[in-house]
Amino acid sequence: GYADAARSKLGVKTWVESMPGNSYHSDAYMETEIRNTFTVSPGTSGLAAGDTTILNITFRLDGTLSVSAPAWPNTGTGWAEMNGGFTIVDLDGSICNEGCYNPEVAWFGASAQAEAYEVNAYYWGYSYSAYWEESWQMASNTTASQYHDDEHSVEQHVGGSMTHFFDTGFQTISFEVVIGHTLRLDVDLSTFSQANRDGRASADFSNTFGYGVLPTVDGMQINWGIPLQPDPVPVPATILLLGTGITGVIGARLKRKKTAWGAV
């Protein structure tokens, strides 16, 4: 994984390959985070500090989950997942109820999982199962929540692999801001891969999450806390995440294994 604030790039990838004699779960987890602030100024738009205006954030997140496992009576499990999203918070705004907090003006969250594993054929009538599922949701202070959910599964008598291509396509969220207010953008992206026995798993979102923030009024300016330095060789799928990056590798995390006798 990596996070390059100066070149505005971020990416994550994990993979695990287990051997048949491995009775433990081998796993890998990678997380990247970026934070930046920005302020909208009137520029030559004719608006003034304290007025409200609409901004658009356009983004796309895509990547690949791959898992494989043998068929029963052999044993093995592969699990891969991705979680990512962003929030934009108005640091100069305040909402007070039982307590006071800075309001979110726009947000997006996504997750995807894939799993392959052996199944006891005497009990279930098939000896291998695999599935994937994905979801994402987005909303803003001017746009109602929008949802997406999808899933797919297979059951068969031979082992195999499943690859799921996750892609939100280009999405745009419009949100309202107050000119002169400072906003904070937090972005995160993580992947997790786990395998045991004769299983394999990978989650590749290494070059896939990008966005841009644009005003809807001519002449308006967006001033970022950390200036951007465009990549000298633009790549269409390059991640355009802006701000300071923190990349971390965090050790083992245990996911439950669906057993051959348990509910699928």
Image (tube, helix red, strand yellow):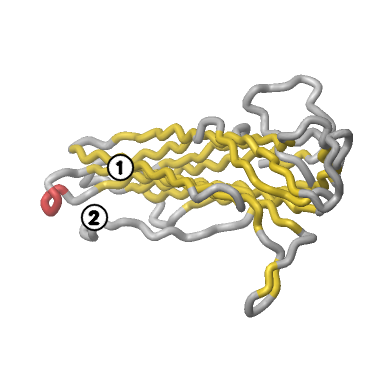
Q: Which mark is residue 130?
A: 1
- State the residue at coordinates (70%, 73%): 100
Q: Quadrant of the N terminus?
A: top right
Which of the two residues, 1 or 105, is positioned nearer the viewer here?
105
SS for callout 2: loop
Q: Quadrant of the C terminus?
A: bottom left
Q: Within the image, what quadrant is residue 131 found in? A: top left
Which of the two residues, 95 or 27, is positioned nearer the viewer here?
95
- State the residue at coordinates (38%, 56%): 23
Say above or below: 70 vs 119: above
In the rendered structure, which amino acid carries the disc numbered 1? Ala
- State the residue at coordinates (81%, 44%): 40
Whether pointer 2 and pointer 1 mark residues with C-beta atoms closer than 8 Å, the reply is: no
Q: Is residue 16 visible?
A: yes
SS for callout 1: strand
- State the residue at coordinates (37%, 46%): 115
Say above or below: 254 vs 195: below
Q: Position of residue 211 (x, y in %)?
A: 66, 36
User: Mark 2 vs mark 1: which is more N-terminal?
Assistant: 1
Which of the two residues, 245 or 176, is positioned nearer the viewer here?
176
Q: Which mark is residue 81?
A: none
What residue is shown with label 2? 260
